[in-house]
Image (tube, rainbow, N blue to C red):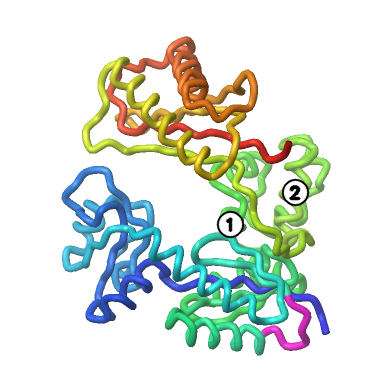
């Protein structure tokens, strides 16, 4: 019996849930996002069925672009309560097994298990989820979370795959570092400055050299990623929300300093109301601005003391917004997105 980590990833989750309640959509291109109207500006795809993906439709793409690529697609609005309910059934089903379940979102979870046949366990989990929800899932198996999540990419859709420490380099070594979960384009560019472009090169790089380039924590961690991930365990402890945010991409650009200030104040009030309803306390407030050119910046400030007073949060957001102007950013230029994020007290 050995310790294994399984990564359970529901296939095209949002689209699949929509097809379950609209069986006539089975086999058709389905796109979920925004209010489901691709003629409205600045709405984005949350997910797309595999039939839509075949036309190049991807998450994060504008609904308008999705409609151009796949004009025959059915566009549906996002329905968070329905997805919450479906996800809860999936996670409850996983917990009926003698395993540890660490939820990572609506459609994925890590499962820690002691077994001598992880593939058999994976098949059992797939069958149980299918019987309980009629939803299909892919499952990756590994000795680390990184290996398991990476293996899921090879298992989709609906399959099972395994990657271990022994097979990590043969499987991933020739691939670009951006294929590693946790390494983005910006880090990849900095690694390329050191001549590191593949996973195997990263795995073979001296951790001291990485520490000098990226710092004593991030540098060695990158090498661990190159080697297939660390040994952080799967935990069933509930994840504590550390922040909450509200942001809006406007159909028509916000113009003028006064209008920007009013929108930020409104968003601050809305997010504070959610925090109060959840029984949490605000410690910091941040403002995000994206201009019509897509140039994006964020600023954050600590409040004088933890608070649940909407006026204090609103005032803090105004102070942060003023910092944009003080550092040369023109708030009178057309703005396409504004957001307010608050950091929450986690103890005391």
Q: Which mark is residue 221?
A: 2
Circle 1 sits on which residue?
176
Residue pictured at 33% horizontal, 58% vertical: 78
The correct choice, above or below, for 232 with respect to 136 in the image is above
Residue pictured at 37% horizontal, 57% vertical: 46
Sort mark 1 into few (<14), some (14-19) or many (20+) by Cα contacts within 10 Å. some
Q: Is residue 149 magenta?
A: no
The correct choice, above or below, for 232 with respect to 214 in the image is below
Q: Which mark is residue 279?
A: none
The image shows residue 181 at horizontal and vertical percentages of: 60, 57
Q: Dot 2: what SS?
A: helix
- The image quarter containing residue 162 is bottom right
Residue 10 placement, left or right of 224: left
The correct choice, above or below, for 238 with respect to 21 in the image is above
Sort mark 2 into few (<14), some (14-19) or many (20+) by Cα contacts within 10 Å. some
**Residue toward you, 116 or 339:** 339
Residue pictured at 58% horizontal, 81% vertical: 160
The image shows residue 158 at horizontal and vertical percentages of: 49, 80
Residue 247 placement, left or right of 191: left
Point out the stretch of residues depicted in magenta. Answer: 113-118
Q: Dot 1: what SS?
A: loop
Whole-number angstrom distance, CA of label 2 to CA of label 1: 17 Å
The first of marks 2 and 1 along the sequence is: 1
**Residue toward you, 269 or 31:** 269
The image shows residue 101 at horizontal and vertical percentages of: 66, 69
The answer to whether any part of residue 167 appears in the image is no
Residue 174 placement, left or right of 59: right
Residue pictured at 39% horizontal, 24% vertical: 265
């Amino acid at each position: 019996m050995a310790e294994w980590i399984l990564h359970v990833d529901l296939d095209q989750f949002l689209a699949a849930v929509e097809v379950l309640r609209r069986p006539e959509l089975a086999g058709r291109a389905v796109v979920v996002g925004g209010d489901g109207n691709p003629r409205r500006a600045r709405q984005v795809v949350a997910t797309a069925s595999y039939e839509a993906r075949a036309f190049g439709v991807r998450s994060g793409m504008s609904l308008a672009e999705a409609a151009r690529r796949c004009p025959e697609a059915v566009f549906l609005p996002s329905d968070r309560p329905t997805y919450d309910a479906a996800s809860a059934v999936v996670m409850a089903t996983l917990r009926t097994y003698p395993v540890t379940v660490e939820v990572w979102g609506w459609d994925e979870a890590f499962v820690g298990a002691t077994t001598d046949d992880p593939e058999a366990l994976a098949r059992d989990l797939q069958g149980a989820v299918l019987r309980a929800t009629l939803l299909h899932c892919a499952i990756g198996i590994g000795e680390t979370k990184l290996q398991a999540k990476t293996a899921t990419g090879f298992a989709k859709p609906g399959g099972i795959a395994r990657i271990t420490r022994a097979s990590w380099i043969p499987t991933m070594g020739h691939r670009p570092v951006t294929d590693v979960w946790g390494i983005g384009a910006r880090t990849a560019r900095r690694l390329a400055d050191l001549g590191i472009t593949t996973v195997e090169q990263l795995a073979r790089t001296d951790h001291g050299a990485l520490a000098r380039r990226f710092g004593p924590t991030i540098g060695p961690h990158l090498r661990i990623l190159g080697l297939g991930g660390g040994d952080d365990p799967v935990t069933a402890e509930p994840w504590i929300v550390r922040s909450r945010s509200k942001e809006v991409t406007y159909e028509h650009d916000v113009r003028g300093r006064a209008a920007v200030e009013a929108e930020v104040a409104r968003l601050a009030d809305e997010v504070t109301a959610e925090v109060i309803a959840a029984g949490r306390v605000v410690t910091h407030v941040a403002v995000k601005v994206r201009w019509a050119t897509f140039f994006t910046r964020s600023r954050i400030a600590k409040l004088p003391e933890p608070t649940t007073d909407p006026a204090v949060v609103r005032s803090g957001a105004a102070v942060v917004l003023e910092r944009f102007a003080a550092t040369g950013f023109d708030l009178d230029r057309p703005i396409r997105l504004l957001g307010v994020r608050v950091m929450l007290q986690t103890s005391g």
